Amino acid sequence: MTARTVARVVVADDQTVVREGIVMLLGLLPQIVVLTTYADDDSLFPALQAGARGYLTKDADGDEIVRAIDDVLSGEAGLSPKIQRRLLERFTEPVRTPPQPPAEPPDGLTAREVDVLRLVAEGRSNPEIARTLHVSTATVKTHINNLFAKAGLRDRAQAIHYAYRHGLAQPPG
């Protein structure tokens, strides 16, 4: 066996058996990469930004783990094929630039009417909007009627389109 670089290891998992199994495996090897259940962007990208050079999900087999560790120790990235694919997808997706909200609300809308409009665009009901803004349902109805009158809108569908067009809200996705 050749001399290898020693790596410090932190094993974190909510399941004791998983932690102990990983510790046992790592006891046989002097290397480490991130091994996790999560392959989503909210887990992957912060780990890579924090300095991880290897990232595998728990479905990786022993050979894949050893290969990733060896890759990382030799200066390469130790990424599972699934993670490599996710990175490529992320960086080849077209960049969507969200519309910039206007400096002042259009059509003389008040800031509160814009707040209500954004919540309407999220698909919230009047009672939900009232709870979110800590006002009565009657107050929400008044704001909606006022913004409909100012912007010349007939219904919520038109209000949602108006909010998107004026950059006051973004379509989901």
Image (cartoon, helix red, strand yellow):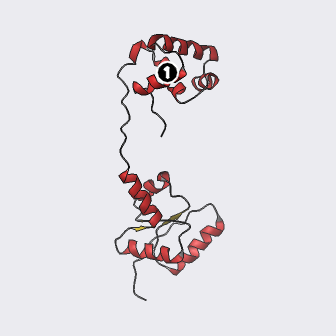
Position of the N terminus by quadrant: bottom left
Q: Is residue 146 left or right of residue 15?
A: left
- Indicate whether 128 appears above or below 32: above
Instruction: Determine the residue positioned at 49% across, 17% down.
Output: 113
Along the line of sight, the residue nearer the viewer: 128 or 29: 128
Q: Amino acid at mark 1?
A: Ala
Where disc 1 sits, the SS reads helix
Q: Horizontal and vertical percent for residue 97?
A: 35, 38
Along the line of sight, the residue nearer the viewer: 43 or 31: 43
Q: Horizontal and vertical percent for residue 169?
A: 45, 29
Q: Horizontal and vertical percent for residue 82?
A: 47, 63
Q: Horizontal and vertical percent for residue 133?
A: 57, 23
Instruction: Determine the residue positioned at 59% across, 24% down.
Output: 129
- Indicate whether 142 appears above or below 37: above
Quadrant of the image occupied by residue 81: bottom left
- Indicate whether 35 appears above or below 31: above
- The reply to whether residue 142 is in sight is yes
For label 1, the crowd category at 10 Å Cα-Cα, with few meaning under 14, some 14 to 19 and many 20 or more, is many
- The reply to whether residue 136 is in sight is no
What residue did someone put label 1 on? 159
Q: Is residue 101 left or right of residue 125?
A: left
Along the line of sight, the residue nearer the viewer: 5 or 101: 101
- What is the tally of numbered marks visible in this picture? 1
Along the line of sight, the residue nearer the viewer: 155 or 70: 155
Instruction: Determine the residue positioned at 63% across, 14% down.
Output: 138
Quadrant of the image occupied by residue 24: bottom right
- Indicate whether 118 appears above or below 148: below
